[in-house]
Image (cartoon, rainbow, N blue to C red):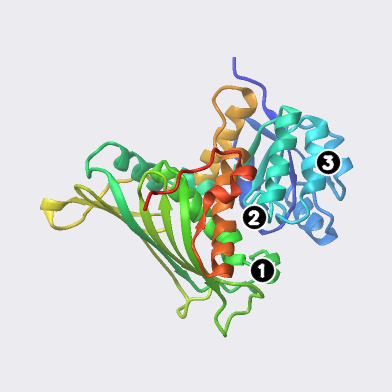
Amino acid sequence: MSAPSLSIVVIGLGARARTWLKVISANPDLRLAALCDPSEAARATVSAQFPDIPVVPTLAEAFAVRPDAVLLCTPPSGRAPQIEAACRAGVAILAEKPLADSLSEAAQFVRMAEDAGIALIVGLNFRYLAVTQAKRALLRDGRVGHAEFGRFLYERWRDGMQPHLNKYPLEMVHPMLWEQSVHHFDLMRFVYGTDARRVMADTFNPSWSHYKGDTNVAALFDFTNGMRLTYQGTWQGGLDRLDFDWRTDCTEGVVAQRDMFGDLQMARRAEGALAPVQLPPHEPWISDATGLLAGFVNTVRGVSAPECTGRDHLHSLAMLEACIASSARGAPVWLEEFAGLTGSAKLEKEQS
């Protein structure tokens, strides 16, 4: 006999919610219990799509349906009332990344959820891309040896004025870091199976940018397992396209990803040329969100250990904060500086 479906409330009905509503509707283990947004226009749009679901303006009305879980598709700033309401109600939380717009506030949310005894999962859907899973497995099975250095390039013209995009990043101080690089830093940690140890970074904004804050990030990371990686990311590239190239050089060869959603290649050193790695079929934005949501359901039901936890997410947010600090100081920053917030033991510095 199958388990009964879980009821879920979606809070925030903007651009990102559109994908989530599609994925939730296709999941037989979930039932939409209510939709919530203070915007009358947003509620009207969703009401037309889901005429049988309560669409309400306040958190009190949303939690009055006594859901099993809540999905936060809201901007990272101002989430405290939503997290607090979920903790009071004892409701599992799936929150869009980043969990908060500062490491310190995110750490408070994590402690609140842990004290309430509820799951707090962050929507890091790129972990569930077929290419991510394949790359992680490849780097762990020894086919190309041990990863030692790499480069991660993400160059994009992101027109933040487009109607299908959320508008709050236009006013953020570090939109590239907090809205995009947070995914990249999480992928580095997930694929390489390690945490950052030290970073030297520079952030800036080109003259033509229509964003208020820095849209360019250049960084050199050292990781605790000895891995080193050069990172270049921008939302205001000179061409209206996305260029993606993530290469990892290993003791016995190379692994390269040339597309955000696929194009994985590998070669052992003696082979001299990269060959494609076969990947299963994948629908961008949908397959990865589906995998993340399935994991969240299993967490709520106690079927499997939680993935993408708020506690783990703090280590990626510490990388963001370290980049900001390094750029401001013009000097390298050790991640041990943030150990009090991440809850990790202090990292040992290399002996010179």
Image quarter hosting the N terminus:
top right
- Which residue is denoted by mark 3 in the rendering? 62
The Cα atoms of the two marked residues, 1 and 3, are separated by 31 Å
In the image, 330 versus 30, the foreground residue is 330
Residue 300: x and y in percent read: 64, 28
> Number of callouts in the render?
3
Residue 267: x and y in percent read: 19, 51
Residue at position x 87%, y 35% from top? Answer: 64
Residue 219 position (above or below residue 69): below
The Cα atoms of the two marked residues, 2 and 3, are separated by 19 Å
**Relative horizontal placement of residue 9, taking residue 320 as reference (left or right):** right
Q: Dot 3, how many residues are within 10 Å of its Cα: few (below 14), some (14-19), or many (20+)? A: many
In front: mark 1 or mark 3?
1
- Which residue is denoted by mark 1 in the rendering? 173
Residue 216: x and y in percent read: 52, 71
Dot 2 amino acid type: Arg
| Element class at badge 2 | helix
Mark drawn on residue 226? none
Dot 3 amino acid type: Ala
